[in-house]
Image (tube, rainbow, N blue to C red):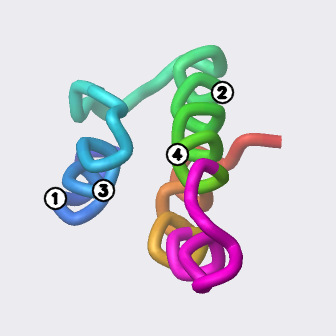
Amino acid sequence: MKLFNNRELELLKKAGVNVENRQEFTSDDKNYIFRQVSEFIMNHSSKNGDIGRLQNEYESIFRTINVK
């Protein structure tokens, strides 16, 4: 079973994060994905609700990589 589903892979691509869909990622890989997706989200406007919408949209990725 792969770590990310097709929807999550599309979201990562949209955020500019190129990952190979494999079963295991190192802690460094997961931290990189977390930082890149977080930066992508924070580069959007909070005034029109983009940040909140994107946080909800990318929530499954954050749960999948489980960065602490």
**Who comes first in sequence, dot 4 or dot 3?**
3
* Magenta part of the chain: 43-54
Q: Which residue is mark 1?
A: 6
Residue sitting at 27 percent across and 49 percent down?
14
Q: Amino acid at mark 2?
A: Asn
Amino acid, disc 1: Asn
- Rendered-image quadrant of the C terminus: top right
| Label 1: element kind | helix
Task: Give whichever of discs 4 and 2 has the lower sequence position.
Answer: 2
- Nearer the camera: disc 3 or disc 1: 3
User: Do the residues bearing badges 4 and 2 touch, measured as CB atoms within 8 Å?
Assistant: no
Is 7 drawn above or below residue 29 in the view shown?
below
At x 58%, y 30%, the residue is: 30
- Give, as a three-letter code, the residue at label 3: Leu
18, 2: nearer the viewer: 18
At which x and y percent is residue 21? 23, 34
Compared across the picture, whether 54 is left or right of 8 comes to right
User: Could you say which disc has been placed on residue 11 in the image?
Assistant: 3
Q: Residue furthest right?
A: 68
Task: Find the distance from the CA under tag 3 to the CA under tag 2.
Answer: 17 Å
Could you give the CA–CA distance between mark 4 and mark 2, rounded to whole angstroms? Answer: 14 Å
Q: Which of the two residues, 60 or 40, is positioned nearer the viewer here?
A: 40
The numbered mark at residue 31 is 2
Q: Residues within 10 Å of mark 4 (few under 14, many from 20)?
A: some
Q: Which mark is residue 18?
A: none
* Cα separation between marks 4 and 1: 19 Å
Q: Residue at x 63, y 46 (%)?
A: 38
Few, some or many C-alpha atoms within 10 Å of disc 1 (few <14, some 14-19, many ≥20)?
Answer: few
Residue assigned mark 4: 40
